[in-house]
Amino acid sequence: MMPSPSPHLKDASDKEAGFEINDDFDRFPQKNEMFRRSWWDPSIRNLKTEAFYRGHSEPVTRHRRAQGFHQPDYALRNAGWHLSDVLADIRGERERCEGFTDVFTLLGEVSSRRAELGSPEEVAGRVKKAARVLGAALVGITHYDERWQYSTRYHDSSGEELPPEIPPGLQHVIVVAVPMPYDIMKTMPSALGSAATGVGYSRDAALLISLAQFIRDLGYRAIPSMNDTAPSIPYAIKAGLGEYGRNGLLITKAYGPRVRLGKVYTDLPLAHDRPISFGVRAFCRICKRCAETCPAKALPLGAPSFATNNISNRKGVKKWSVNAEKCFNFWTLQDSDCAICIRTCPYNKDYGKWWHRAARWLAGTPLRRLVYSLDGFMGYGKRLGPERWWAR
């Protein structure tokens, strides 16, 4: 394994972002991320794991009797994932899985002529407008932070650990969020509901490649990145897209945890956004619904801590840490991803309705316990039967 440079443990904006970092913090190797472990770790990889991955890429020839796991459900799931899968394998090289272990490379050359765009604030405004045209629902900008970059990347097929692909000098990170469809997410856990995840990834991949090309045509370097290179949540928090929740996910004001994230690294001079706070941490301290409804018991019931569950958790960061081993094992047992923790989250709402916006505001006040009780009383977060979704 290649050694990682000693990172600076503190950053000026950590307190504003709610980050608490210990002296034993170190950069995280991509090899230990749960999906990568499922390829090399014999305690994780088994016949169920292999069937889980095959089911996403091969023609649908099997299904289950349970609602949400019939052939049309798997067909829609795989259709949602299709563009993301095609882009991942676009180079036809077994050693690359673009968007997941490697950065996207489907890009044109950088223009030899640099556009005159004004101040960093003006440029940031233009980039955000372009990102929304290209499909982003949320856009924020922050600085490159070596601490959150994977120390090494990992290839599933060869088992090699290789250097990161982000070159020096790309000091700005544009973070985007794409929402997953609300109604279909309510059918989780199901193969049908997993279509929302696939659609989110496919839209995210197309958006990131397009946004990076926009910047390259302005005469600046830009590299699009999805789950490769670094986890997106720390960058998203720094860029003001949301707060960290008990379920281990980013909670946004507009969509709750129902988003897929991506980022573009660039040397285009950009003004940065600041972290936001709308009461998520305080609300999650009293709300344990995601942890209580998790069938795998993979989510913590206690307060944020520096404790880790296994090597798939980053050491040295105080937070709610998910037991990814338990979570992924449940996915493979049911043959599709879960997302009950998204479905049941009180922040998972249609905020086009004024009463949900009012409840979100109250959740950030001392009346948060009332909001939590009313949310349960009204039955929000209950599963929608997949057959009912098809019949709508």
Image (cartoon, rainbow, N blue to C red):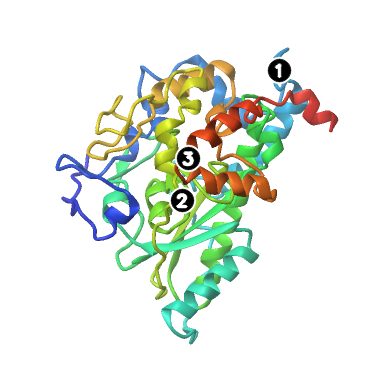
Left or right position of 348 against 288: right
Residue behind mark 2: 278
Residue behind mark 1: 63
Q: Quadrant of residue 244?
A: top left
Where residue 15 sits in the image (x, y, percent)? 27, 53
- Front in this rendered view, residue 170 or 360: 360
Residue at the image point whose x is 46% and y is 46% from the top: 365
Which quadrant would the N terminus be assigned to in this image? top left
Camera-side mark, 2 or 3: 2
The amino acid marked with disc number 2 is: Phe
Q: Is label 2 in contact with label 3 (beta carbons under 8 Å)?
A: no
Q: Is label 1 in a helix, a strand or a loop?
A: loop
- Front in this rendered view, residue 312 or 251: 251
* Label 2, residues with CA under 10 Å away: few <14, some 14-19, many ≥20: some
Where residue 38 sits in the image (x, y, percent)? 42, 26
Residue 273's place in the image compared with 338, above or below, is below
Q: Is label 3 in contact with label 1 (beta carbons under 8 Å)?
A: no
The amino acid marked with disc number 1 is: His
Residue at the image point whose x is 36% and y is 18% from the top: 42
Q: Is label 2 in a helix, a strand or a loop?
A: loop
Residue behind mark 3: 94
Residue 155's place in the image compared with 135, above or below, is above
Q: Is label 3 in a helix, a strand or a loop?
A: loop
Camera-side mark, 2 or 1: 2
Where residue 250 sits in the image (x, y, percent)? 46, 44
Please indicate, yes or no, whether residue 210 appears anywhere in the rendered image: yes
What whole-number distance in Å separates the C-alpha atoms at marks 3 and 1?
Answer: 28 Å
Residue at the image point whose x is 68% and y is 28% from the top: 187
Which quadrant would the C terminus be assigned to in this image? top right
What whole-number distance in Å separates the C-alpha atoms at marks 2 and 3?
Answer: 44 Å
Left or right position of 27 against 120: left
